[in-house]
Image (cartoon, rainbow, N blue to C red):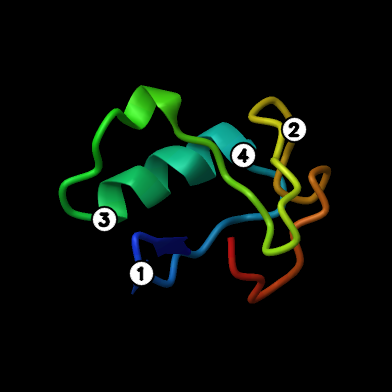
Amino acid sequence: MLYNGLERQIEAKPDEPVKKLLADAIGAFPSVTNPHTLSLFTRDGRELDDHQTVRGAGVKPCETL
């Protein structure tokens, strides 16, 4: 995960919801402002749907979001 130039490694199970991955990411970074407005994006700018699973959203192993 990348946020404001900081990088953190977060593990996710393929069948867990993207929404849980987002919550884990928010918790991994200090001083996240307005967390309710954040989403996860791939490097090419595609926004991940919070209601899909990690696998369903097409997230690949070791992919930076």
Kindly indicate whether the residue at mark 1 contacts the one at mark 3 (C-beta within 8 angstroms): no
Name the N-terminal-most of marks 3 and 1. 1
In depth, the one of 44 and 16 nearer the eye is 44
Note whether 51 is above or below 8 in the view shown: above
Circle 2 is placed at which residue position? 52
Q: Amino acid at mark 4?
A: Val
Name the N-terminal-most of marks 1 and 4. 1
Circle 4 is placed at which residue position? 18
Percent of width and height locating residue 16: 63, 42
Instruction: State the residue at coordinates (73%, 39%).
Output: 53
Q: Amino acid at mark 1?
A: Gly
Q: Is residue 16 left or right of residue 15?
A: left
Name the N-terminal-most of marks 4 and 2. 4
Kindly indicate whether the residue at mark 3 contacts the one at mark 2 (C-beta within 8 angstroms): no
Give the CA separation, mark 2 to mark 3: 23 Å
Percent of width and height locating residue 5: 35, 69
Q: Foreground mark, 2 or 1?
A: 1
Res 15 quadrant in image: top right
Note whether 4 is above or below 41 in the view shown: below
Q: Amino acid at mark 3?
A: Phe
Q: Amino acid at mark 2?
A: Gln
